[in-house]
């Protein structure tokens, strides 16, 4: 017998009425997200300096990180010098992206940029099984200039390239990054949701401290990394 509270049991007709009422709100939220995306496409942009980053093959200009594409999504990964395991949130978020070739059809690329030295960053990439391209901004002000300074937070930035000129078109951080994740989207449709204390859940629902159910970076490495056997 379960020790958790359960949703009330009703007849099918009652369930369908409640579902339909919820679906109306979900559809309204979808239309609002469409409107937000339309406004995002109308944002102005700002020209970026000619930054030089460091990648697996050595120094590379920001314009060349696009690899011929016109659009670029950058995830600014948190980095803590000297730590074996980096931010579990960043590690978990980026571990989702194993098939990014579909972006080719949209003239776009998605990469990771971190403040860590490139050799350490690439070693960490292998350790946790990350498949995205990594670049280092350790010797550049790029990270600090786009909202991800040394010892700072994570961020997502989007850029548009016109020839050799790069423009910054969008930025988000904090929970704004959730919109790019499929993990929370899946968890949020479960009856018990994320099971975190801050969420508005019915009385008796299982709840734990925030982040306590998240996989650690070590967990992710065990599942997908160089020593996982996968």
Image (cartoon, grey):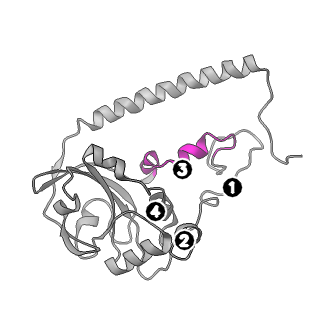
Mark closest to the chain's N terminus, 2 or 3:
3
Packing grade of label 4 (10 A; few <14, some 14-19, many >=20) is some
Packing grade of label 2 (10 A; few <14, some 14-19, many >=20) is many
The residue that appears at 60% across and 46% down in the rendered structure is 187
Badge 2 marks a residue whose secondary structure is: helix
Disc 2/disc 1 C-alpha distance (Å): 24 Å
Tell me if label 4 and label 3 are in contact, CB under 8 Å. no
Q: Is residue 92 magenta?
A: no
Disc 1/disc 4 C-alpha distance (Å): 21 Å
Vertical arrangement, residue 15 with respect to residue 153, above or below: above
Mark closest to the chain's N terminus, 1 or 4:
4
Packing grade of label 3 (10 A; few <14, some 14-19, many >=20) is few
| Residue 128 image point, x, y percent | 49, 71
Residue on which the image places disc 2: 221
Residue on which the image places disc 3: 183
Task: Give the left or right position of residue 79, taking residue 63 as reference.
Answer: right
């Amino acid at each position: 017998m379960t020790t958790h509270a359960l949703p009330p049991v009703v007849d099918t007709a009652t369930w369908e009425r409640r579902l339909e009422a919820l679906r109306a709100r979900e559809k309204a939220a979808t239309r609002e997200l469409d409107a937000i995306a339309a406004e995002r496409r109308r944002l102005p942009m700002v020209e970026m300096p000619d930054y030089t980053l460091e990648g697996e093959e050595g120094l590379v200009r920001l314009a060349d990180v696009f690899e011929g594409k016109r659009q670029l999504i950058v995830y600014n990964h948190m980095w803590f010098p000297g730590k074996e395991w980096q931010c579990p949130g960043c590690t978990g978020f980026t571990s989702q992206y194993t098939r990014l070739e579909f972006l080719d059809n949209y003239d776009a690329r998605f990469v990771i940029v971190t403040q860590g030295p490139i050799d350490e960053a690439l070693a960490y990439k292998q350790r946790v099984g990350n498949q995205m391209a990594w670049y280092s901004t350790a010797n550049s002000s790029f990270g600090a200039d786009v909202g991800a300074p040394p010892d700072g937070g994570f961020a997502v930035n989007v850029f548009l390239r016109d020839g050799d000129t790069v423009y910054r078109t969008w930025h988000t951080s904090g929970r704004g990054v959730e919109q790019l994740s499929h993990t929370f989207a899946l968890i949020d449709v479960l009856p018990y949701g994320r099971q975190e204390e801050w969420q508005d859940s019915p009385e008796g629902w299982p709840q734990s401290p925030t982040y306590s159910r998240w996989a650690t970076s070590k967990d992710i490495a065990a599942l997908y990394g160089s020593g996982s056997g996968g």
